[in-house]
Image: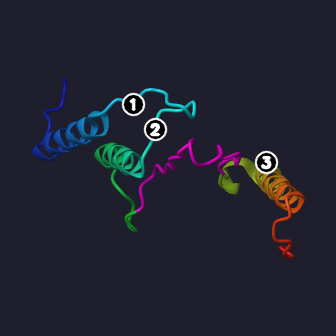
Amino acid sequence: MKKRMTKKTVEQRRKILLLMEQFLEERREVGKSGWAEITEDDIAKLDKVLTALIDAKCAPDADGDRPIEFRLIDRTREMMPSFQAMPFRRDVGEERFLEHAHYNLAVAYSQFDTAYSIFSAIGGTRRRML
């Protein structure tokens, strides 16, 4: 037997639909850059949609934190993140936890080293960063 929706649930669904309509009001095609244009407003609107979905699905903890977190990446301005989410040590054990930490550190250093090499090669500022 299906549960009847509460007034709050109905309001949350209406809010989600409104936020989705606002996000989708303008379709963008691929432009000269090879990507569809994305604005900061687009990212903010999508953030609101996802936040509303999470809030409708899950109650926050005692501190007000949501059990699901996300980060939106504007691929027209930022590189894809290469990091792995860090599992709780209690769930995977110390060895697996350290493997994740090592991977993230190696990726971060590789990205730093690449950027530093590029800036050095083109005569950028050679500050001592480490």
Q: Is residue 81 above or below residue 61?
A: above
Instruction: Determine whether 55 is above or below 14 in the image.
Output: below
**How crowded is the residue under tag 2: few (<14 C-alpha within 10 Å), some, or many (20+)?**
some
Residue type, mark 2 in image: Glu
Q: Is residue 15 left or right of residue 107?
A: left
Disc on the earlier residue, 3 or 2: 2
| Residue at image mark 3 | 96
Q: Position of residue 54 (x, y in %)?
A: 36, 46
Which of pointers 1 and 3 lies earlier in the amino acid sequence? 1
Q: Are marks 1 and 2 in contact (CB under 8 Å)?
A: yes
For disc 2, the marked residue is: 37
Pick whichever, 123 or 76, lies toward us: 123
- In front: 22, or 60? 22
**Residue 6 coordinates in the image, percent (x, y):** 13, 42
The answer to whether 60 appears left or right of 2 in the picture is right
Q: Amino acid at mark 3?
A: Arg
Q: Which residues are magenta?
A: 65-85
Marks 1 and 2 sit apart, C-alpha to C-alpha, by 7 Å
Q: Which mark is residue 28?
A: 1
Any magenta on residue 76?
Answer: yes
Name the mark nearer the viewer: 1 or 3.
1
Residue 31 pos. (x, y %): 49, 30
Q: Residue furthest left?
A: 7
